[in-house]
Image (cartoon, helix red, strand yellow):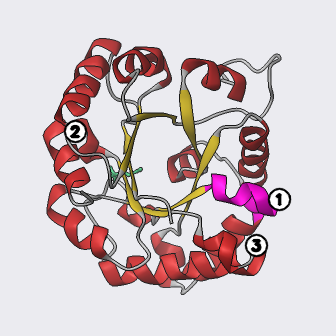
Amino acid sequence: MKPPLVIANWKMHGTRAEAENLARRIHNGMKDLRHVEVAIAPPFTALATVADVLRGGEIQLVAQNVHWEEEGAFTGEISPKMLRETGCTFVLIGHSERRHLFDENDQMVSKKMSALLRADLLPILCVGETLRERKKGMTRNVISRQLRAALKGVSKNAIEKITVAYEPVWAIGTGLTATPDETSHAHRWIRKVMTRLFGSTKAMRCRILYGGSVRPENAAELARASEVNGLLVGGASLKAGDFLRIVSQFV
Ligand code: PGA
């Protein structure tokens, strides 16, 4: 298994100057990265700035979204090639804010998945159920549907390039966190679906992160929960000190 991965998702926060400052503080505050991988997802406008700060170091750059075409008349969109050129290693796809606020569906996520793998970028596939779906007992169905749709057509050899992030929609930005038990349950289910699709050796190589109101106060128990291979951190990654404390749970 690869080392755990902790990602800072800054969403739509920060000017370039603010991003530079925050990236520098995280970069300088990071001490021992032997046991954990760390990555930062700034807004598109700050990618190049943050890439400069991180250059030569071990923290990797993540894009928050991508379009599946290489180029063309797609106003407002950014292609995989453009992200690679900016220095991105990873790209988030299927984030619940994209699915729920911008109507992205499973087919679009699947096209993004294929485009990223073609471009040699590493997809972070986000999946997760809404509160309504959880209450109706549909958590497993929703996760399976999202995984199967996004991974359709992905070859066995490509599977280890993919990271899955379990982000229950009801826990994102709400202050509600899935308990370590709820998290482990969902992660075990994700692993099971991946095993059915690609076999256990391949499925075991794929990291499964948890995301949703991760804070320095709850990071330790989430980091120790079984089947948790890292964290995707939104709000708490906007304060260097908080993010560094979260990362330190894996060191
Ligand atoms: P949050 O966001 O930590 O602010 O809940 C997590 C995410 O959406 O990636």
Tell me which label, 3 or 2, sits earlier in the chain.
Answer: 2
Tell me which label, 1 or 2, sits earlier in the chain.
Answer: 2
Against 84, residue 91 (above or below) is below
Residue depicted at 20% across the width and 67% down the height: 220
Q: Which residue is tagged 2? A: 30
Kindly identify the amino acid type of the residue bearing the numbered disc 3: Phe
**10 Å crowding of disc 1: few (<14), some (14-19), many (20+):** few
Against 20, residue 146 (above or below) is below
Nearer the observer, 200 or 10 = 200
SS type, badge 1: loop
Q: Which residues are magenta?
A: 149-162
Q: Which mark is residue 198?
A: 3
Residue 164 locus on image (x, y percent): 56, 60
Asked whether, in this view, residue 109 is left or right of residue 189, the answer is right
Kindly identify the amino acid type of the residue bearing the numbered disc 1: Ser
SS type, badge 2: loop
Q: Residue furthest front?
A: 34
Residue depicted at 54% across the width and 23% down the height: 87
Residue 144 locus on image (x, y percent): 67, 75
Q: Which mark is residue 155?
A: 1
In three-dimensional space, the C-alpha distance between marks 1 and 2, rounded to whole angstroms, equals 35 Å
